[in-house]
Image: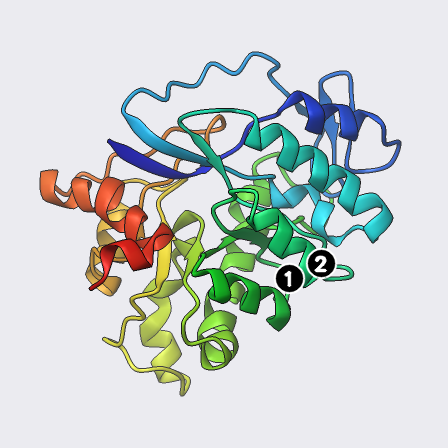
Amino acid sequence: MSVDVHQHVWTHPFVDALRARTSPPYVDGWTLFLDGEAPYEIDPHDRRDTTGLELALVSMSSPLGVESLPPEESWPLIDAYHDGALALGEPFGAWASTCLSEPDPDRLAKDLDRGLSGLQIPATALPDDRLLEVLTDRDLPLFVHPGPATPTPGTPPWWPAVVPYVQQLHAAWHYFHAVVRPRHPRLRVCFTALAGLAPLHSERLIARGGGTRGLVDPDFFVETSSYGPRAIDAIVRELGIDVVVNGSDAPYAKAPEPGLGAAAGHAIRVVNPRRLLHRRETRT
C-alpha cells in the first residue's frame, strides 16, 4: 500500500469560509480568486482514485496566501480547513496549517495534537523557530509548498506554476540547508515538486563557494509531483533514492511513474514516506 504526501481537497467547510470573504483569497460560486493568478474553476465533484493508497495527505494550498493574512482573517480559514480535512476519513490524513503573520506555537501544538501529520508552510515564508520546535518536540515533519505568486502582467496561465513556484522552492531548499538546518538539526523537511530541481544545481553552488557535493541530508526529502521519470532519475543520481517520496498534487495531477524499477518504486511510494512521517517507528 502506497503513501501520497501531497493532495488537496476542497471540503465544504473550507469552501464556505472562502465564500464568506470578499477579497482574495475568496470563492464566488465555484470560482476561486487569488492575487497573481487567473480565476480558477473548482470542480465540486472530486473524482480522484485512491485505490492502493494506505494514506493520502491533504493540505491547504499555500498559494492561496491564507497563512500570511492577519490573524483575524487567517484563523477562521485555517480552522475550517482543519475541520474539513480531519473529517474526510480513510485513507486521508492532513498537514496542519498555521497563521504566520503572528505565529502561535501553542495553537499549533493543539492543532497537531488533533491528529495532523505535520505542518505545511509556504516556500515564501521564513519559518519561525518556535513553530519548528513544536514539530521537533513531537517528531513531526515540515512540508514546504509553493506560496503565493507575484503578479506578472502579460504571462500565460501556466506561468505561476512553472516560474514563481520553482523559484520559491529553489530559495527554500538553499535557505533550509544554509540557515535552518544548523538551528534545527533534528527537523525533517519535505519539499514539494522535487524542490523545483534545486538539488541539481550543486555544481554551481560549489563553484560559487557553497556546499560540498556528495553530502546528502537524510532528513531533507523531496516529493515527485509535477515531474516525471527524467527529472526523478536526475534527482536520484544527485541525492540517492532514500529521500525521494511519492506525491501527486491531486486533483490537479496524478502521481508520476518513477520508471526506475520495482525496488525504487517501492522505496518512493512506501518505505521513504513512512520514514518521513514516522522516524521513531522505522529507525533503531
Residue at the spot x=66%, y=49% of the render? 149
Label 1 environment density (alpha carbons within 10 Å; few <14, some 14–19, many ≥20):
some
- Along the horizontal axis of the image, is 51 left or right of 178? left
In the picture provided, is 250 more to the left or to the right than 10? left
Is the residue 77 above or below the residue 149 in the image?
above
Residue 123 position in % (x across, y down): 57, 57
Image coordinates for residue 238, horizontal then vertical, percent: 24, 64
Vertical placement of 70 versus 205: above or below? Answer: above
Cα–Cα span, label 1 and label 2: 8 Å
- With respect to residue 245, does 253 lie above or below? above
Q: Going by the image, does 254 lie left or right of 68?
A: left
| Residue picked out by circle 1 | 125
The residue located at (80%, 25%) in the rendering is 19
Whether residue 229 appears in this view of the structure is no
Say which quadrant the C terminus sits in: bottom left
Quarter of the N terminus within the rendering = top left
| Picture residue at 79% right of the left edge, 50% below the top | 69
**Crowding at mark 2 (Cα within 10 Å: few <14, some 14-19, many 20+):** many
| Residue to which mark 2 is pinned | 100
At label 2, the amino acid type is Leu
Whether tag 1 and tag 2 are in contact, CB under 8 A, the answer is yes
Q: Secondary structure at mark 1?
A: loop
User: Horizontal and vertical percent for residue 187?
Assistant: 44, 67
Query: In the image, what residue type sits under mark 1?
Result: Ala
Residue 122 x %, y %: 60, 54
Q: Is there any visible trace of residue 74 in the rendered image?
A: yes
Residue at image x 85%, y 32%? 21
Q: Nearer the viewer, residue 64 or 153?
A: 64
